[in-house]
Amino acid sequence: MPTEILMPALSPTMEEGTLAKWHVKEGDTVNSGDIMAEIETDKATMEFEAVDEGTIGKILVDEGTEGVKVNTAIAVLLEDGENADDIGEVSEAPKEDASSNMAPAEASDATAPAAGHGRGATDASPAPAAPAAADGSRIFASPLARRIAADKGLDLAQIKGSGPRGRIVKADVESATAETPKAAAAATSDAPAKSAPAAPASGPSADAVMAMYEGREFEEISLNGMRKTIAARLTEAKQSIPHFYLRRDIELDALLAFRGQLNKQLEARCVKLSVNDFIIKACALALQTVPDANAVWAGDRMLKLTPSDVAVAVAIDGGLFTPVLKDAEMKSLSALSAEMKDLAARARDRKLAPQEYQGGSFAISNLGMFGIDNFDAVINPPHGAILAVGAGVKKPIVGADGELAVATVMSVTLSVDHRVIDGALGAQLLQAIKENLENPMTMLA
């Protein structure tokens, strides 16, 4: 039976996307793993792979189409022996709940956010005679997967699906054996992650604002997916997270001198460390020194992380990314520098995979290179804190001997989620960051 290929949700915040490019055309044969299209999400451009094999019977959404809702049918896949005459009417409306939105002749699965390397795929819809589990619930499996399972004598109820929303696909049944019940019983399908909610309406409506400027020259700028997501998430963060702020001045002269020595020695390896590399390392080590602050808010509980996974804000055209440097406390300064340069470059090209900008417990936002002395950053949920870094500027200070001197001073502000980190704990964390930066050689010990 012809089956719909749906617009996948390639990230937890994706509600719609742009079908940037088709790599197949009507009549082409595709196999599992073949790249079918490129889809632009609110964060990146990612490749969309086929999960089942078949023939592209009809393309429903032209390449270049913007605003394609998640779970909208974008193409129709034909199995062996089927042709275009079998397609009939295919709904192009998004399926908000596949289990209650099935057409009489064919049904569609809801699509969960893709995992892996930023590539997602929505496979064929199950035939009406889909099997049911022991409790009467429906088992989602592609037609090809059901056929292979029947040939191998496998019980689909005992196989965990790797497709969207836990759907069983060809690869699952091909790798399964008749002895899968134990593993299947221990595994449960993950519920599909919900897309980020739209930002609550606040202030006057768009029409009311435009009316205020009637007769004045202006350009109306539509919001792209990334800007909509930023607006929604940061509005939610400011409204729901009880922020408080801790500020410290950090003297950088020892760090700048030490950085100069290291960079001179690393010239032959074409390595040049930035102040930001030291800040990342200092924060990662501070999270190990104050492990209770290495935590995130998880709705009705906290998760205390063991590694220091540090996110760093990267400005791109029209928005920002926060790629995550995992296990940052274990990496050398040169390794952190190289990884950060790679992540930043791919962020600007919108080539990051979701797992590269999701997660982490702590973030850094550095506007010092833009001449900003200090600022307050908004916490990126579910992080427990974010460090806002200002510029290093020459300032008069009072030395330990009471004498006036001039030093390069950097102002930082730690924005803290009070649900996760109390005031004294946040102060300990910021003190540990300050000590690491003012005594940079200890970070190499």
Image (cartoon, rainbow, N blue to C red):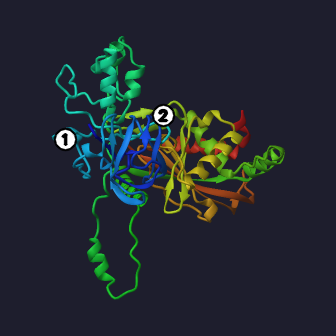
Which residue lies most toward the bottom here? 215
Q: Nearer the viewer, residue 1 or 336?
A: 1
x and y, in percent, of residue 218 in the image: 40, 81
Q: Residues within 10 Å of mark 2 (few under 14, many from 20)?
A: some
- Placement of 322 over or under 165, stated as above or below: below
Q: Which residue position holds label 1?
A: 102
Q: Nearer the viewer, residue 246 or 365?
A: 365
What residue lies at 48% left-to-right and 48% top-to-bottom? Answer: 46
Percent of width and height locating residue 424: 48, 42
The residue wearing badge 2 is 292
- Amino acid on which the number 2 mark rests in the picture: Asp
Residue 254, compared with residue 121, is above or below; it is: below
Quadrant for the N terminus, please: top left
Residue 325 at what x, y percent from top left?
Answer: 57, 41
- Does residue 326 lie above or below 170 as drawn? below
Percent coordinates x, y for residue 43 in the rendering:
46, 52
Q: Secondary structure at mark 2?
A: helix
The circle on residue 402 is none
Q: Amino acid at mark 1?
A: Met
Q: Nearer the viewer, mark 1 or mark 2?
A: 1
Q: How far apart, in angstroms, are the residues tagged by discs 1 and 2? A: 48 Å
The disc, 1 or 2, on the residue closer to the chain's N-terminal end is 1
